[in-house]
Image (cartoon, helix red, strand yellow):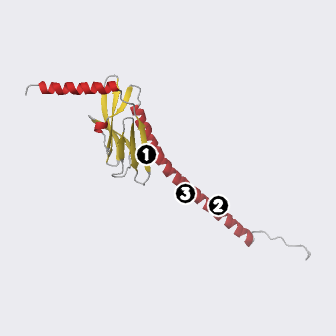
């Protein structure tokens, strides 16, 4: 061999090795940040999914096929309980939305209940009932606050007059009974 011919060395040089380590480090850091973002997004979407599911479940309950009208029951409502009446062709029932332990539930006046949301903070839920809507403000255990609004039907004056007449008849019937 002649001395003027350059010798080709096989293998990595120090510069190539450093470049490979740098690229590997950048890829690993990028993947870690991506996985953390996915975990955070999943936590937030689970919250939104639970609240949306509860809203949909209750909305379907009050807008069932055989429900004619859903009106507020202002006498049974407070900042701790929202009360409403579901009027069907055959009957009329009163329901209550309330916080029970760490859940929001709907219960009937004769028993039974339907859980709407779980994992609610101890005393963090408030209810507001108007003649045409129910508002629920709740705070979950992780500190997030949600506002739920449910639009109700307006009670007709005819329905109010019927209730007043029915109440008067009940009072008359009670006063005329022998003791």
Residue drawn at point x = 30 percent, y = 33 percent: 94
Q: CA distance from mark 1 to mark 3?
A: 28 Å
Question: Callout 3 environment at 10 Å: few (<14), some (14 to 19), or many (20+)?
Answer: few
The numbered dot on residue 36 is: 3
Find residue 42 and report its horizontal and vertical position in percent.
Answer: 51, 50
Q: Are marks 3 and 2 in contact (CB under 8 Å)?
A: no
Question: Callout 2 environment at 10 Å: few (<14), some (14 to 19), or many (20+)?
Answer: few
Q: CA distance from mark 1 to mark 2?
A: 41 Å
Label 3: element kind: helix
Quarter of the image containing the C terminus? top left
Decide if residue 72 is on the left or right side of residue 169.
Answer: right
Of pointers 1 and 2, the one earlier in the residue sequence: 2
The numbered dot on residue 147 is: 1
Q: Are marks 1 and 3 in contact (CB under 8 Å)?
A: no
What residue is pinned by disc 2? 27
Label 2: element kind: helix
Res 163 → quadrant: top left
Of pointers 1 and 3, the one earlier in the residue sequence: 3
Find residue 31 and report its horizontal and vertical position in percent.
Answer: 60, 58
* Residue mark closest to the camera, 1 vs 2: 1
The numbered dot on residue 31 is: none
Res 115 → quadrant: top left
Find residue 95 and report its horizontal and vertical position in percent.
Answer: 32, 35
Decide if residue 76 is on the left or right side of residue 9.
Answer: left
Quarter of the image containing the N terminus? bottom right
Q: CA distance from mark 3 to mark 2?
A: 14 Å
Question: Callout 1 environment at 10 Å: few (<14), some (14 to 19), or many (20+)?
Answer: few
Residue drawn at point x = 25 percent, y = 24 percent: 165
């Amino acid at each position: 061999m002649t001395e003027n011919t350059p010798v080709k060395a096989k293998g990595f040089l120090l510069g190539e090795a450093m470049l490979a380590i740098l690229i590997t480090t950048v890829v690993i850091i990028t993947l870690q940040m991506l996985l953390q973002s996915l975990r955070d997004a999943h936590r937030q979407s689970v919250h939104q999914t639970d609240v949306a599911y509860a809203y949909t479940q209750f909305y379907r309950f009050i807008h069932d096929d055989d429900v004619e009208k859903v009106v507020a029951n202002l006498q049974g409502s407070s900042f701790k309980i929202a009360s409403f009446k579901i009027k069907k062709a055959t009957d009329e029932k009163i329901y209550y939305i309330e916080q029970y332990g760490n859940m929001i539930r709907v219960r009937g006046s004769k028993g039974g209940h339907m859980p709407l949301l779980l994992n609610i903070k101890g005393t963090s839920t408030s209810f507001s009932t108007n003649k045409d809507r129910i508002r629920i403000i709740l705070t979950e255990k992780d500190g997030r606050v949600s506002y739920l609004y449910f639009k109700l039907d307006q009670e007709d004056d005819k329905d109010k007059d019927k209730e007043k007449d029915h109440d008067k008849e009940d009072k008359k019937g009670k006063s005329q009974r022998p003791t």
